[in-house]
Image: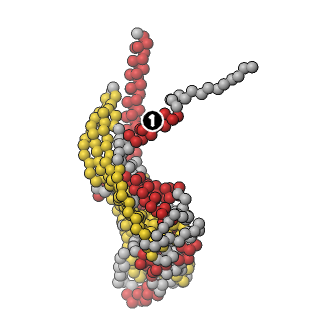
Amino acid sequence: MRTIRKITIPETGRPGIRNSLLLMLVLLLSACTTSRIDVARHVSTDLSRDTGIVLLARKKDGGQKTEEDFMECLNNALAKMQLLVQIYPEQDFLDKLFPWFESRTAPATPGELPALLSRPGVREKITEIGVRYIVWVDGSSERVDGGGGMSCAVGPGGGGCFGFVWWDTASVYETNIWDLQNARSVGAVSADASGMSYLPALLVPVPLIARTQNAACKGVAEQLRGFFSEDRSL
Amino acid sequence: MRITRTARGEAASFRGISARFLALCALTVAVCACSTHLHVDSAFPRPLVANLPINVGVYYDESLRQYTFEKEADANSQTWNIEIGPAHVQLFDQLFQPIFENLIHIDSLRSASAARPVSVVIKPSIDKYTLHTPGDTATKFYAVEIRYTLAFYSASGDFIKHWSYSGQGRSRSELFSADESVQKATVAAMRDAAAWLVIELTKHPGFHTRLQAQQSDNANDPEDHDS
């Protein structure tokens, strides 16, 4: 009796070794980042599966300082967590409540909420869409310092770069959580992450990027989970 | 030896083709990057406001319908051609319809008789569109300011007064998507101005009676109402 055995030979080594190499490469290409997260809780949140929250970027002069990819990162990070609330899309919220949350009309403090909620149709619309908490997001990531130099050249026989460039990035974000039903502040989370990125080049530039924005996003999301999940505590 | 020569010939030929291809790509990128035509198109939300129980006529002239911003290339910016007229007609319709009980589109400002079934006629216009690129301001943002005039006329077409107001919008500059950033900044400026306008129109529910009173007092002494 003839037995046919199918033998598969990995083209580039074992998956375990390949994954380890990939992990080492990622770690090698990531520069160090330090971050600090501060949390302030004023009151406990009142949650159920029907409770909605919305993350709004604070706007000024018709625009927002906070990057769209930070808002996306925060929304995605919260969506992956086991929260007791539903996350309402930001643009839908702004459109449904237009013009009351635009840059020139949005309430600046929780004290302005009662006047806003007393306007015709506003409280009814908020109740209809089920949003109870607003998470205001403000801040940005900025390059604060840098130096070095690099020169690149291309010729008929090829090209390459030589040099060394570095820069410091600071990511500072602040979130404030408001309870629309009781017109008060529930708490705040702030994140401050900094790191130095490098770009050494010996023929080929090798970027070593400090992912400060990502560190701030993960830190803020982790603390916001404390407000909107079962393990919340005052 | 022949093989080596052929290989060298192929390599040279490949380099030549590569160089031509790169030059063509660079030329294409240069031509595309020098001029951008943008047709601003966006859905605008219906304002959440109380309805005013009046009939209003709205007149969009050709200069509003066809309004296009043009900017020649300079040291800080490429050539821009931004078509914003049709988006504004859409925006004003979307704003006025929920605010007024009846919104009637009229074809001309002047009417032979005062028999139009409207209390007031509104004529919106764009006075100025300003675009600041990141190169102009040394920031990471495209900034847009749009200045408007909203003129009020009686049913027969007599000028009553006008309001001047403006909207500002900003959008972060993204690599290889300047047109998207300008579109976002423009829509933000339109929303900003629209927010002011909606609030002003609905702040004083009896504004049309005051307009009519002002018309009888002094129709030729317009009062500015700036944002």
| Residue B30 to residue B158: above or below | above
Q: Nearer the viewer, residue B88 or A10?
A: A10
Residue B183 placed where, x, y %? Answer: 43, 58
| Residue A199 to residue A50: above or below | above
Residue B195 placed where, x, y %? Answer: 44, 72
How many labels were placed on the picture? 1
Which residue of the protein is positioned furthest toward the top in this rendering?
B1
Please indicate, yes or no, whether residue B32 appears anywhere in the rendered image: yes
Which residue is located at x 46 percent, y 70 percent? A234
| Residue B146 to residue A153: above or below | below
Q: Chain of mark 1?
A: A
With B185 as the anchor, is A196 left or right in this view?
left
Q: The residue under label 1 is which amino acid type?
A: Leu
Residue A205 placed where, x, y %? Answer: 33, 37
Judging by the rendered image, the residue that carries numbered circle 1 is A21
Q: Quadrant of the N terminus of chain B?
A: top left
Q: Nearer the viewer, residue B196 or A60?
A: A60
Kind of element beneath mark 1? helix
Which residue is located at x 50 percent, y 58 percent? A78
Here the colouring is secondary structure
Q: Quadrant of the C terminus of chain B?
A: bottom left
Please indicate, yes or no, whether residue B127 appears anywhere in the rendered image: no
Residue B20 placed where, x, y %? Answer: 39, 31
Which residue is located at x 69 percent, y 23 percent? A4
Which residue is located at x 53 percent, y 55 percent? A80
Bin the neighbour count of mark 1 within 10 Å (Cα to Cα): few under 14, some 14-19, many 20 and up: few
With B161 as the anchor, is A13 left or right in this view?
right
With A196 as the anchor, is B154 left or right in this view?
right
Quarter of the image holding residue B5? Answer: top left
Quarter of the image holding residue B18? Answer: top left
